[in-house]
Image: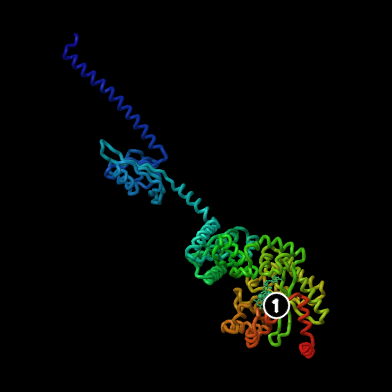
Amino acid sequence: EPFDQADRMVLDAIGAIAQGALANADLYRQVHMERGRLASITLNIGEGVCAVDAAGNLTFVNPAAAALVRLPSREIAVGDDLPAEALRAPEFLLGPARAAMAAAGVVRDDDGCFEGPAGEPVNVSYTASAIQHNGEVVGAVISFQDITERKRLEATMARQAHYDSLTGLANRRLLVERLESALERSSRDGKRHALIFVDVDRFKAINDSLGHGTGDDLLTAVGSRMRQVAGSKALVARFGGDEFVILLEDVGGVDEAVTAARRICAAVEMPLILADGYEIVASVSAGIALAEPGQTADDLLHDADVAMYRAKGRGGTWQVFDRAVMGSRSSDRIDLEAALRKGIERGELEVYYQPIVSVADERIVGAEALVRWRHPTEGLVSPDRFVPMAEETGLILPMGAFVLNEVCRRIRSIRAGLGVDVPISVNLSPRQFQQSSLLGEVASALDRAGLPSSLLKFEITETMVMDDLAGATEIMKRLNRLGVRLAIDDFGTGHSSLGYLKNFPVHEVKVDRTFVNNLAFDRVDAAIVGAVVDLADAMGIQAVAEGVETAEQLTALRQLRCHNAQGYLFSRPVPGEDFEALLSAQLLPEVETIELRAV
Ligand code: C2E
Ligand code: CA
Ligand code: CA
């Protein structure tokens, strides 16, 4: 039976519905595929993705997000299968979500901080986008990346550019930058800045004998000691190797820098316990320089370095840069080293002698040999300018050998010409003192000149002894056995106490001229010199006052019953011939002297 009208209408309707259903099914399939694709992307990308609804509940979390940040429950690390009950999003996600929803747009931050699974801070870069439906904001999606590692790397790189990796102190570059800007400002604000250049004494020896690991530990320990005591105003930098530089900005004057240097040296010289249990007593030499108007960073560093070398030459303490004594920029150490090397070969060195007199009657009882360098163009160069450098470079050894032989020749010449024996003192630098061949050289120099060893005296500073008490005592004992005499030089400037003196096997103690300077006025200095003299008496050794320039000082020394004295008041250091002339004048009988004067 053919379909009737009504049937046809029904069929049409069914057809339309079927067509529609087919179309819907297609759409459904497409939507489903699209969703699947999106889901698989969000589930598999490394970036964290979270969705939050308008009420602040989590509606979606991808596995990457669940792994990177702390979420309310561990079970939600499964894509969009969130539990039915509402899960409040953590505050660090809510913040960005709210911002995006309020803006009804996108919010980005490359410097965000979320919480990691254990609550630790995680640096993230995130994008939060509002989700809109029919013109209404219904939630937000936050996608983010963990950039903690990158941040750490950036921070390390920034540190490496300005900090020393071993000690964690500022490095040379940061120091120079800060110094340059301080000097630049001071041309406007008139503030003064100072540098303290610190070098660890005998670091090379420590490094060589105890190993580089121990050397590194030592530098680290020294650096942290310095930082502890340098004060918050100071910048402590590792300048390179075993050199440290401390920048003191806006100091009142050189005294303030000296006080800081004293404090720093004293702190470093307290025993240090290193990582592997070694106990080390380090000593340092420090040079202090106060910036002068117009000086560059390089100039000031150079000055502080020169002062440090001078301190080192004296056996390690601190020295303030003094342009008059230590010269200007032109006297570059390297030029100087080359020139001295040649100078030694060409015989430009000479030995001068400064008489040592008896305080009681001012008669010459000995002399100190002081090296001089007759530079072909610069004239007579003071040892303060080249002895420290010679010490550091090792040139001190050939130089010392020359002085030793010259002195032996001179003692012999006095013996032969004037028929008297006058002991002469020779300065020993730390390096010479520790040199293993010292004893042999001394013995053979005496032998060659055919002299009794008692005519030779060696001056060593107390710092040289204190640096290594046991080792130094051993060397002193051996020199004693050889029969030569020993003097402790510059006494009072180092770090030993008066009480130590009695442990040193020496025949003489030389009171440093800083105590002699104000002797006539300063009761404390007088008391110190008095105490040294008493101790010397008790030990049966001689006390010699250095740098005596005035009659008042001599009077004070007489009152304190100091034995011997040396200084410009009696004579400057003079060439060997002149010293012999002074001696022979003294040897003339008293009457003849009077007659001579009368003539
Ligand atoms: P030092 O051993 O303390 O020598 C004494 C210094 O004081 C000498 O300086 C001397 O000229 C100076 N002097 C002497 N009397 C007076 C005075 O009344 N007033 C003042 N203001 N100064 C006075 P010089 O000759 O310039 O020597 C400086 C330093 O160089 C010496 O200090 C010593 O440490 C070192 N030195 C000199 N010759 C030698 C040497 O042959 N070998 C070694 N290793 N070091 C030497
Ligand atoms: Ca001396
Ligand atoms: Ca001296």
For the C terminus, the image quarter is bottom right
Tell me the residue at 70%/82% (across/down): 570
Residue 561, by quadrant, is bottom right
Q: Is residue 179 visible?
A: yes
The residue beneath circle 1 is 572
Quadrant containing the N terminus in the rendered view = top left
Q: Is residue 319 above or below residue 565?
A: above
Q: Amino acid at mark 1?
A: Arg
Residue 57 placed where, x, y %?
Answer: 29, 44
Residue drawn at (77%, 75%) of the image: 576
What residue occupies the far right of the structure in this picture? 416
The residue closer to the viewer here, 500 or 298, is 298
What is the total number of numbered labels drawn onto the structure image?
Answer: 1
Residue at image position (23%, 19%) is: 16
Numbered disc 1: secondary structure: loop
Give left or right: position of 79 versus 215. Answer: left
Question: Mark 1: is the Cβ under 8 angstroms from ligand 1?
Answer: yes
Residue 536: horizontal and vertical position, in percent? Answer: 66, 83
